[in-house]
Image (cartoon, grey):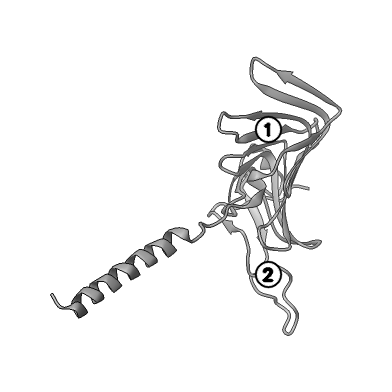
Amino acid sequence: MTDRSIFWRLGCAALTILACALLFSMPARAERADRDKPMNIESDQMRYDDLKQVNVFTGNVTITKGTIVLKADRVEVHQDPEGYQYATAYAAPGKLAFMKQKRDGLDEYIEGWGEQIDYNGKTQIATLTKHAVLKRLAGAKVMDEVHGSVITYDTYNEVYTAVGGKDQVSENNPGGRVRATLAPKTASTPGAAAPSGAGTALKPSNSLGNPRE
């Protein structure tokens, strides 16, 4: 084997090692920061159920976790052995529990309502149940609005699904179907500046919601 061949093979090996080192040193796609933020809770009262390993907060409960805000009359919170946190919010009679979260990398917010809201800290999925409403806002402007009996919102992938039900039945919606209003992806006025986040709508399923005022 010639000296030139030996040096060529050594050079290839060095390049291969360098490429592998660069590949494995590249950072993975970062998760949204809300998952790793502490959960802060304010309420009129708190009770710890040792048997169920659940903290029960009652009376004007407000929970913040990063950009996530959850408000309800009563909230049950527990944490699994892996450290993931779970919250179930219940509204007072005749009212709706509320949640809000900033969209990742955009000046937009998602707001949601339901008689019950379940937040799964491990999957980062929020489930809004009964008279559920989900809105996407750019500033004070409502861009998308979905109503249904159950709305499931994947806060990480920004994907939602909605299904109808008996609580959606009304004179204008006897079948209790899901209905929604979705803003166009581009500005409709020629020469007008697009609102922040325009063109980045949520990704709905094939089932969409019903307005309830």
Outermost residue on the bottom side: it is 191
| Residue 128 image point, x, y percent | 66, 41
Residue drawn at (66%, 58%) of the image:
104
Residue 170, compared with residue 181, is above or below; it is: above
Residue 46, compared with residue 21, is above or below; it is: above
Query: Mark 1 Cα within 10 Å, few/some/many (few <14, many 20+)?
Result: some
Q: CA distance from mark 2 to mark 1?
A: 32 Å
Residue 150, compared with residue 29, is above or below; it is: above
Q: Write down the quadrant of residue 188 in the picture.
A: bottom right
Can you see residue 161? yes
Query: Mark 2 Cα within 10 Å, few/some/many (few <14, many 20+)?
Result: some
Task: Depth check: give the residue in front, 19 or 107.
Answer: 19
Residue drawn at (70%, 47%) of the image:
133
Q: Write down the quadrant of residue 189 in the picture.
A: bottom right
> Mark 1 or mark 2, which is nearer the start of the sequence?
1
The residue where tag 2 is placed is 198
Q: Write down the quadrant of residue 199 in the picture.
A: bottom right
Residue drawn at (72%, 25%) of the image:
55
Secondary element at image label 2: loop
Considering the image in quadrants, where does the N terminus appear?
A: bottom left
- The amino acid beneath tag 1 is Thr
Outermost residue on the front side: it is 3
Secondary element at image label 1: strand
Task: Depth check: give the residue in front, 74 or 213.
Answer: 74
Callout count: 2
- The amino acid beneath tag 2 is Ala
Q: In the shown orientation, is residue 45 left or right of residue 195?
A: right
Q: Which mark is residue 88?
A: 1
Task: Depth check: give the residue in front, 114 or 18.
Answer: 18
Outermost residue on the top side: it is 51
| Residue 98 image point, x, y percent | 76, 42
Q: Are the two marked residues, 2 and 1, in contact with CB atoms closer than 8 angstroms?
A: no
